[in-house]
Image: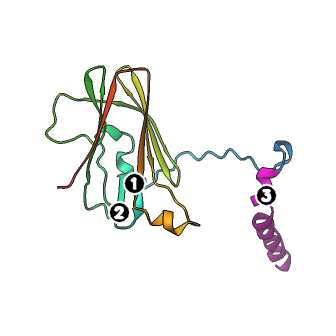
Amino acid sequence: MASDSGTILRLCLYFACCLPFASALPENIRPYPLDVTVSGFQAPSLPLAVRNPYLSAWLPGSQVSNLPTAQAEFWTSKTTLGWTILAQVDGKTFTLFGAPDGITNTTTATQKSIGYTATHTIAELDAGAASIVVDFFSPVSPNNHLRQSFPFSYVTISVAGSSDVQILSAIDDS
């Protein structure tokens, strides 16, 4: 029994002391691969604009597969936020996020992929001739309290494949 606890202690010390420095080692002697992929994991919600519990917008996990028709929610999931992002590509209007009620004559963009990290949720969509990347970014600065106190989150939209694109992002307060 003492041998098992000694082994566990040595492993804990190894993970605590050695692994943080593994990225500095040459690739051929790293103790583990740095490219880690997890599949089959479904997060309950993806962060869109998150600054604190009172200022946050989340994409529910059940709506992840279709961003253009998804509705952002407050963290309690009891309040839907009226956040819409539209793109007009070569004169045709596409819904990129949050299909709005009462707006007609729009086409739903086709979602190619979506991914997330602790600070980014990034979606790739096709809208007509344009390939569009929507990046929801909520910066975290744990060592800078002033910067962390600013109530800002960012949405960056990148477009390729078409030169005539206009973007509209609107948040309805009702």
Query: Compared with residue 50, is residue 94 higher up or lower down, i.e. above or below?
Result: above
Q: Are marks 3 and 1 in contact (CB under 8 Å)?
A: no
Mark 1 surroundings within 10 Å by alpha-carbon count, few (fewer than 14), some (14 through 19), many (20 or more)? many
* Position in image of residue 86 (x %, y %): 28, 35
Q: Is residue 5 magenta?
A: yes
Start-end of magenta stretch? 2-24
* Position in image of residue 13 (x %, y %): 80, 70
Residue kind at label 2, given as amino acid type: Leu
Query: In the rendered view, how is the structure colored?
Result: rainbow
Report the Cα–Cα distance between label 1 and label 2. 8 Å
Residue kind at label 1, given as amino acid type: Ala
Residue that carries the numbered disc 3 in the rendered image: 21
Residue that carries the numbered disc 2 in the rendered image: 55
- Hey, which quadrant is residue 103 in on the image? top left
* Dot 3 or dot 1, earlier in sequence: 3
Query: Can residue 73 be seen by looking at this rendering?
Result: yes
Q: Secondary structure at mark 3?
A: helix
Side of 11 where 56 appears, left or right:
left
Residue kind at label 3, given as amino acid type: Phe
Judged by its main secondary structure, the magenta piece is: helix
Front: mark 3 or 1? 1
Report the Cα–Cα distance between label 3 and label 1. 32 Å
Q: Is residue 47 magenta?
A: no
Query: Can residue 31 be seen by looking at this rendering?
Result: no
What's the residue at 36%, 52% (across, down)? 60
Near-viewer residue (137 or 123): 137
Front: mark 2 or 3? 2
* Position in image of residue 110 (x %, y %): 36, 29
Residue that carries the numbered disc 1 in the rendered image: 49
Near-viewer residue (122 or 168): 168
